[in-house]
């Protein structure tokens, strides 16, 4: 009997070792491959299904009962469930299913966070840093060598790339403020400045404004108790932003374009970047007012505009190009599933902040929610699938990093237990 038990024990150790290696590989590979366009639950992406497999073998289903107590995880499950139910009262179930797939991107947070622990953290960080660095290098080459916006080889439009730069800037700015090592602190400062410089050379005005406002929020939260440092940081930030704005032909062109758009609106021309957004939002709000509680059904937001534009306000918008999405998270969700969806999405943002706050990350949590909220006013977050993945990965790594720091501060005897 003793011999049988000793034979089983090494076998169990081998299984754990293989599962642990699989989990590390999945976290590492996902960080690199998340930039692949179309990565989702329903594409045959090796890195994605490897992550799900590792999660399942690691006892993910049993961990789910614990994770679901987190408001953010609960909100993700509720939002995805309601979007799925919205297909029932949609006139186009196929389009509704495709729309649901976009929102299902939030679900990746559950297996990713469940797999993370102190020993696997470096693999996850390594993967996301390598992936981010490769994409950044390609974006810099596209912009400053080929004079092109976005990253066409990856199918990454300039809006996505600008969002990625904004997230990188805010992350490095925060990390530079909390680092004790002066060399690392200085390196992160210069990196954050460089990322902001590159972002000023992209055409995404709304996302750049979201980055600037979010960075002011971040600086305020970090240094408000140290007024001299606060005012110095704000002054440096505005000086750098002014220099980048003045030196960027893209920024100046988009500023002139905004002025031209306003003039066009005064003459009744909505066929401009700003005019199209105002037209989409106008029709979207009208659509929400028609069915305020449950909306028009998942996937019906676009169809509603393309049909209503012919008659709404005597056909004022009928000659505008067909809608892809409303360029506004709140209007888009409200059109799909009404007030029920809006309340759920607000709960998701609140839960997102709460999960970070509970791990002593309230400052980056407030900054992240500010950035997501502001980007969601002029653009559609779920349309940027890679950006959702990036935000969720950063959130999960931040939570695990705090847990690891907490474990490291414990006595060695308690760490073993």
Image (cartoon, rainbow, N blue to C red):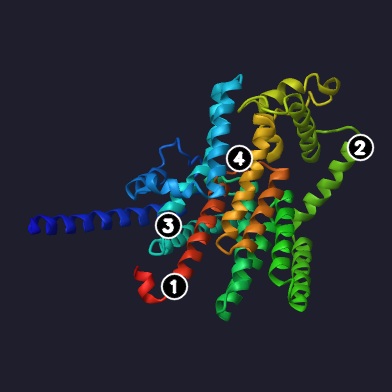
* Residue count near mark 3 (Cα–Cα under 10 Å), binned few <14, some 14–19, many ≥20: many
Residue 408 badge: 1
To which residue does mark 2 refer? 266
* Residue count near mark 2 (Cα–Cα under 10 Å), binned few <14, some 14–19, many ≥20: few
SS assignment at label 1: helix
- Residue 180, relative to residue 103: is it above or below? below
| Residue 146 at least partly seen | no
**Closer to the N terminus: mark 2 or mark 3?**
3
Q: Looking at this view, is 412 or 96 the one in front?
A: 412
The answer to whether 324 appears left or right of 42 in the picture is: right
Residue 116 badge: 3
Q: How far, Cα to Cα, is label 3 from label 1?
A: 16 Å
SS assignment at label 2: helix
**Closer to the N terminus: mark 4 or mark 2?**
2
Residue 383 badge: 4
Quarter of the rendering containing residue 164:
bottom right
Q: Are marks 4 and 3 in contact (CB under 8 Å)?
A: no
The residue sitting at 77% across, 37% down in the picture is 277
Q: Nearer the viewer, mark 2 or mark 1?
A: 1
């Amino acid at each position: 009997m003793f011999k049988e038990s000793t034979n089983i024990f090494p076998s169990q150790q081998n299984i754990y070792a293989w599962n642990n290696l699989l989990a590390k590989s999945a976290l590492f590979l996902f960080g690199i491959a998340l930039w692949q366009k179309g990565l989702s639950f329903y594409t045959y992406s090796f890195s994605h299904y490897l992550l799900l497999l590792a999660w399942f073998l690691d006892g993910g289903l049993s961990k789910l009962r614990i994770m679901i107590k987190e408001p953010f995880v609960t909100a993700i499950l509720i939002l995805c469930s309601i979007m799925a139910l919205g297909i029932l009262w949609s006139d186009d179930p196929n389009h509704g299913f495709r729309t649901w797939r976009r929102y299902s991107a939030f679900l990746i947070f559950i297996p990713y966070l469940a797999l993370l622990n102190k020993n696997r953290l470096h693999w996850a960080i390594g993967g996301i840093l390598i992936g981010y660095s490769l994409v950044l290098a390609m974006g810099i080459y596209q912009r400053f060598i080929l004079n092109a916006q976005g990253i066409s080889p990856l199918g990454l439009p300039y809006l996505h790339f600008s969002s990625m730069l904004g997230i990188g800037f805010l992350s490095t700015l925060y990390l530079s403020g909390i680092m004790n090592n002066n060399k690392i602190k200085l390196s992160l400062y210069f990196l954050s400045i460089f990322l902001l410089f590159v972002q000023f050379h992209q055409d995404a005005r709304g996302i750049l404004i979201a980055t600037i406002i979010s960075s002011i929020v971040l600086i305020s939260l970090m240094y408000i108790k140290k007024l001299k440092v606060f005012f110095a940081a704000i002054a440096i930030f505005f000086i750098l932003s002014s220099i980048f704005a003045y030196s960027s032909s893209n920024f100046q062109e988009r500023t002139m374009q905004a002025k031209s758009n306003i003039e066009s609106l005064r003459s009744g021309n909505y066929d401009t970047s700003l005019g199209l957004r105002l037209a989409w939002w106008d029709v979207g709000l009208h659509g929400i007012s028609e069915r305020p509680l449950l909306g028009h059904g998942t996937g019906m937001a676009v169809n509603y505009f393309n049909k209503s534009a012919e008659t709404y306000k005597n056909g004022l918008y009928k000659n505008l190009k067909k809608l892809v999405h409303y360029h506004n998270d709140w209007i888009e969700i409200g059109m799909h599933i009404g007030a029920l969806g809006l309340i759920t999405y607000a709960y998701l943002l609140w839960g997102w902040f709460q999960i970070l706050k509970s791990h002593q990350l309230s400052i980056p949590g407030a900054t992240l929610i500010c950035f997501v909220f502001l980007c969601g006013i002029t653009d559609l977050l779920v349309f940027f699938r890679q950006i959702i993945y990036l935000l969720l990965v950063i959130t999960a790594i931040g939570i695990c990093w705090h847990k690891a720091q907490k474990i490291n501060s414990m006595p060695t005897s308690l760490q073993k237990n």
